[in-house]
Amino acid sequence: MEVARRLWDSWEDDAEIRDVATGRFIDRDKLHHVDFAGRGFSVKGPSITPRPPQGQPVVTVLDHGSSRVPYELPARSADVVYVTPHDRGHAESIVGQVRAVPREGEPLKVFADLVVFLGSGAAARKARLDELDGAEFTSDAEVFTGAPEELADLLLDWREAGIDGYRLRPGNLPYDLKAVTRGLTGALRRRGAFRADYEAPTLRGLLGLPRPANRYAGAVTA
Amino acid sequence: MGRPRSGPHPSPAIPCPDTDAEGLRLREHKGRIHDLDVVGRPESLTVLSALAAVTERLGLAATVNATFNEPYELARRLATLDHLSEGRAAWNVVTTSDAFTGENFRRGGFLDRADRYTRAAESVAVARALWDSWRPDAVVADRNRGVFVRQGAIGTVRHSGRHFTVDGHFTLPRSPQGHPVVIQAGDSDEGREFAAATADVVFSRHGTLEDGRAFYADVKRRLARYGREPRDLKIMPAATFALGDTDAEAAENAAEIRRLQVGPQTAIALLEQIWGRDLSAYDPEGSLPDVDPDPGKDVTEGRVRPADRAAVAARWRAVAQEKNLTIRELVIEMTGRQSFVGTPAAVARQIDEFVQADAADGFILVPHLTPGGLDEFVDRVVPLLQERGVFRTEYTGRTLRDHLGPAEPRTVTPGAPGAPAALAPLGEASWPDPSTWPSPSTGRAGTRRPGGR
């Protein structure tokens, strides 16, 4: 992730000049070798692709909190961490653990993962999977079965515990995805907890993440 | 005629080969990033996946390096494109033997010439084994029985070779074409052999009709050794063009395009590449430097170098004297002349002539501008080719294989007869040997290849 972020920064935003008079396509003072040398990789750079619209694409990591230092990787490198709480108390303790890891810059967004069987026929779809598995269907994430209104209440409850957002995994496509887009979003809007319109053109904007400054901007060129 | 594809940028100004056709490291000139060409290309498979959504019949050929990518990943990404495009994916297989480019990759180094060819061959063979590992009828998707794939219809791929070990299952159902079309541009003996064994299309370029016929006959002759028919491998050289209402106007248009491609700064940079020294004090509109090339020194990284710069320089000097050319005029003269220059009727006739004379099965057009550079050809030349009965007036199939007409994909696995591992494989990535840099005397032109530009 460090190498990728350096490469995304290796072109400054205004590096492409297309200057006909001097025949130059780029201002090479605004391109930078990343000169990364680590245990896994060694990369000279610069990137062969210009810096993208978001500066750096959003980086997300699923973390079950089972590593030696829980949530260290996402706290150090990601913009969003997916976590897998099984109830509100669990959510609170996970958020506490995440916030305890030192981090520079913007606070890490904590999103909870949930498997959802939603709306009409939800219980039957879940039962069908249980039957096919020959055992109760389980997942690393909590499995929710119920109505959109109930799920909306749960999401808001966990939000109180410090969860910033959610990644919902539809239990059975396309039914449970449709139940999310057609049922849950309405239930959340009625609670004032979901957008009625897109407020930003980029994913970073929608997630409330700022566009990262370029670490090389103004640096002496390689 | 092959359906051309175009990249997102205007064609780069200097018509010289990269050492790495996928361009996996920005070139450097005199120790600094070269700034006179269009650079900053997006990753081709991602772009083609987006194009798949907004086109219906175009072939989508991705230039992807077999030196720095894992075959499992490549097989998966290319099969994905084939699914997304409903059978229009192609892989232009290129390689790199260059420590400079290698500095962007974990290995940090590079493969020597012979090894990069064996790696490419093994890479293609592994990809084909993976593409073949799902039976065409593997996906049942029976909701009532709760069965998605047919029992026993997904084979295990076990490969243990010199460069790769793969043991497992492929993650995708067989794609519409079975195997995406494999494109290659080898020209050396090994490259031709590799093409004969495994490629569907070769686009090596041979300027004159005679050179083209010799290449065509040689490569087609090699096919029998691998149990293939002449029609199984299409020879479709890369071709550039300039049109005009009269021959004189076409020639002037061709010259104007070349002047735009080789600006004053570019002319000096190219000359420095051959001379191996700083020539920035020289006037591009003036005469050649008196100093001789520095034989030991390379000023440019990331480009194929002339094998013998002194010889190339001597040839250039001779042409400059004979024709009384300035530096810029000389560079224009010696690099990248268009393949077909003339009125639409003349160009249609020349193209047809190449095909009828067995010098080519078709061409891959490389427009000098993108987008828009093909419009004039499509409007003015294609109708004439259709009148001659040598260009389709409608599509007869849906997939790229249908358009090209090669046979069903062959399964080539390492160790099997005809397996690429038995060869010294893949020739020069995609360009003629740089020791025979483009020169009017041979009719060769080092124009940019079509993939990924």
Image (cartoon, rainbow, N blue to C red):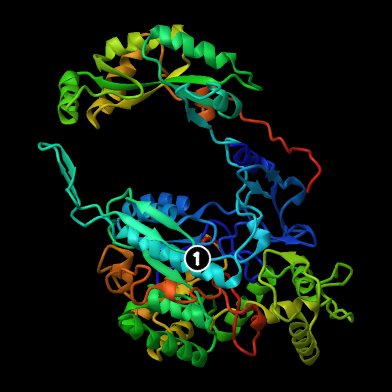
Q: Residues within 10 Å of mark 1 (few under 14, many from 20)?
A: many
Residue found at x 53% / y 56%: B8
Can the viewer see residue B36? yes
Q: Position of residue B141 (x, y in %)?
A: 17, 43
The chain carrying label 1 is: B
Query: Closer to the camera, B279 or B258?
Result: B279
Left or right: residue B138 compared with residue A113 = left
Left or right: residue B355 compared with residue A126 = right
Residue found at x 76% / y 75%: B274
Q: Is residue B206 above or below residue B367?
A: below
Q: Secondary structure at mark 1?
A: helix
Q: Which amino acid is tagged 1?
A: Arg
The answer to which quarter of the image holds residue B412 is: bottom left
Can the viewer see residue B235? no
The answer to which quarter of the image holds residue A135 is: top left
- Judged from this view, the residue extending furthest toward the left is B144
Left or right: residue A162 compared with residue A154 = right
Residue found at x 66% / y 74%: B258
* Count of numbered badges drawn on the protein: 1
Q: Is residue B410 above or below residue B54?
A: below
Left or right: residue A89 compared with residue B23 = left
Query: Closer to the camera, B101 or A66?
Result: A66
The residue beneath circle 1 is B119
Query: Closer to the camera, B448 or A92?
Result: A92
Query: Closer to the camera, A40 or B103?
Result: A40
Residue found at x 45% / y 25%: A198
Q: Position of residue A145 (x, y in %)?
A: 24, 17
The quarter of the picture where the N terminus of chain B appears is bottom left
Q: Position of residue B374 (x, y in %)?
A: 48, 67
Q: Position of residue B453 (x, y in %)?
A: 55, 61
Q: Is residue B281 above or below residue A151?
A: below
Q: Is residue B63 above or below residue B334?
A: above
